[in-house]
Structure formats: C-alpha cells, structure tokens
Amino acid sequence: MDRYLGESTPKLGFGFMRLPKLADGTIDIDETKQMVDRFMDAGLTYFDTAFVYDNGESEKALKAALIDRYPRDSFSVATKLNAWMQAPNKEAAHQQFFTSLERTGAGYFDFYLLHALQKGNLEKYDEYDAWNFVKEQRDAGLIKHWGFSFHDSPELLDQLLTEHPDVDFIQLQINYADWEDPKQASRANWEVARKHQVPVVVMEPVKGGLLANPVPQVADILREADPAASCASWAIRFAASLDGIITVLSGMSTLAQVEDNVSYMRDFKPLTDSERAVIERAQQELAAIDSIPCTGCHYCTDGCPMHIPIPDIFSAYNRKLVWDDAEGARRRYEDAVSAEGAGRAGDCIACGQCESACPQNLPIIELLQRCAEAFDA
C-alpha cells in the first residue's frame, strides 16, 4: 500500500461525543480528565470533537481535560463546521470556526471537517462558501489538514471527491454491521475512498454502542471465538484493519471503556483470517435481525417541535424487537417520555425535520408511527 496521511497515527482515536455526565446533565470534567490521561499514557493522541457536540460543551471539555494540560505538539485535534445546524447564514457558519478556536484554545486544528455531508445539506455548504473558507484557514496556518465527514451514497461520495480532489481526508461510518448495508454502504464508501487514494478516519465503529453490547446471537459467536476479548474490540479492530485508515474513533463514556480499548489498541494487531471468519458469522446473524439502526446521535431531536426523545424511543422499541422483552421495552419507553416537556411517539406531526437531520437516513416518521402503535395504543 502507498504511503498516506496519517499512516503512523495510532489507530484508536478519542471521540468527544459521548462524554460522561453528572447528575445535572453537565459533562463530568474530572472523569474526562482521567480518561484523557489514560488514553495519552498509552501513546494514543487523536481527539475528535465538533462545534455542535453538546452545544459546544464538548469543545470546552476538550480544553479543560486535554489542551490546558498537555503540550500542544503531543496530540492532534479534529473539530467540525456544521452548515445546517446553528448556522442561519454564511457569517454564522464561518464564525463557528473561530468560536471553536476560542472554546478549545487549540491555536490551530490538526484536522478540520465540514460536518456530516449528505444530499439534504450539500447546498448549505455551497451557499455558505464553506469549501473555500476552510482552505483559506488552512492557508493562514490555522488548519493543517481539511476534509469532510459523510453520510450518504458511494455515488455522491465519488462525485464530491472528483469535484474536490485536494481534500486531505474524509470521515466515514464504517462498522461490520453496516459493511454491506445498502443505506450505510460502509464497504462501498470505503472503496470509493481507496479509489481516490483519500485516507479515512472511521466513525461509529461500534454503531453507537450497539456492537459493544450486541444481541445474544452475535455476542455468543464473539465470546466463543475469544472469551477474553470484549465485543467492542472485535468491532474496532475490524475497522482499524482496513487499508488507508488514519484512526478509528471511539466515543468513550467511562474510564472502563478507555481501559478496555487501550488494552488491545495500544499495540494494535490487525484481524487474522480466522478472526475475519468470525466477523462474517456475526454479520450473517445481524442481517437476520429486525431492528431500528439508530446510533443515538440525537441530531434529530434538536429541532423537534414536539420535543420527542426519538433515539430513546427507538432504543425501547429495539428492546421489544431484538430481545423480545415487551415489559422492559414499555418501561424504557415510559421513562423516556415522562421527562419534563417530552413528547410521546404518537405526538409526531410529521414535519420531517428529524428525517432531514438523520445521518442514518432513517424513515423516522414511519418508525415513530410503529412505536406509537406499540406503546401508545
């Protein structure tokens, strides 16, 4: 394989999207510091956040837990500009970059991305001249490498990489559950990246935690193959074993998750042929299960006029579908919709805001109707 940007980067990155929370809902900075320390002690150096994560609190947490405490040249920081959330105009979109610089105190960004590109929001990035703006900041020395994260078809990815051949890297959702999925097209999108020789940062390697605690049929296959290995390790090593990978992001929420990830990624070894065969068996089992493939990113909830906790409702419904636990599913549903101001599945007014924001391209309106029939009837 030809040399590429990031080939020497440690293959585990720290995603600052699902940080530990205190009882009041704020980020637990003390535990986050412990997690960062363990990660850095293991020689791992890549940290990923975004302007919109936790309404900016993620970037502030990165400053407190990492940037204020370690030499700037000892780690890499990635963050993102989102033209379709919190950006009512071009000026506001561009300001996100400078706000991110201020929040993080990073001085510059090693990796900077246009966030979550897909058909439904591309026009905003063009309208706001985001492509040229990012390159201007690179030329000014405030960005080392620029790229975009992507949630759409391989055909659109091929078009974008053809139109923007100077992009340094891209970020793709890659995991073994989505590898052959026609909507997520993990394999096909990765192949487009290889065709253009653009290196890849992997997001959602454990599919929002679903592959860290998979359904029993899959967990049994993995544990039979290696009782000592966590289910998450199989998913992260699968993604990290691909060609052209800069790093694989794990959105860790506890120190225990950091410890587990560090145990097998500080001295990363690609999957063997026999281990790949185990993954293929797991893929076959997953393909036979009916579930809602929601990753819990919560992009759908930010603009919901009915304040419906969509990912939590889908999690409850999956409890019924996958685990055949009707009672547990109803408890989870009632817990989700009993929060102050929360709407129920049946309160959906089909405005479509959620579907336009969903990186997984889920038919949310239809799925909420199914959930309402199951829980609100």
Image: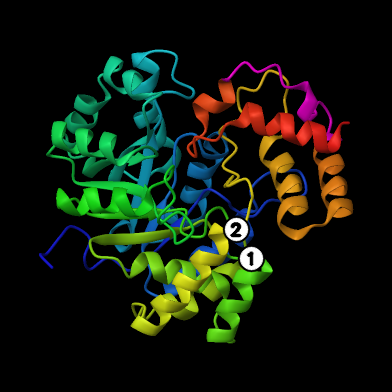
Quarter-of-image position of residue 294? top right
- Label 1 Cα crowd, 10 Å radius (few <14 / some 14-19 / many 20+): few
Residue 349 shown in magenta: yes
Q: What stretch is highlighted in magenta?
A: 337-352
Residue 292 placement, left or right of 186? right
Residue at (36%, 26%) from the top-left corner? 119
Taking the view exactly as shown, the residue that stands out farthest to the left is 2
Residue 102 placement, left or right of 131? right
Q: Name the residue under label 2.
A: 210
How many dots with numbers?
A: 2
Residue 177 shown in magenta: no
Residue at (42%, 78%) from the top-left corner? 277
Q: How is the image coloured?
A: rainbow
Q: Closer to the camera, 247 or 186?
A: 186
Q: Closer to the camera, 196 or 325?
A: 325
Quarter-of-image position of residue 90? top left
Residue 301 against residue 280 in the figure, above or below: above
Percent x, y for residue 95? 37, 23
Amino acid type at image mark 1: Asn
Secondary structure under the numbered disc 2 in the rendered image: loop
Percent x, y for residue 109? 30, 45
Residue 213 disc label: 1
The answer to whether one can see residue 112 in this image is yes
Type of secondary structure dominating the magenta stretch:
loop
Q: Closer to the camera, 234 or 80?
A: 234
Percent x, y for residue 372? 79, 31
Amino acid type at image mark 2: Leu
Please identify the quadrant where the C terminus is shown.
Answer: top right
Residue 333 against residue 125 in the figure, above or below: below
**Badges 1 and 2: C-beta atoms under 8 Å apart?**
yes
Residue 86 placement, left or right of 24? left
- Label 2 Cα crowd, 10 Å radius (few <14 / some 14-19 / many 20+): some
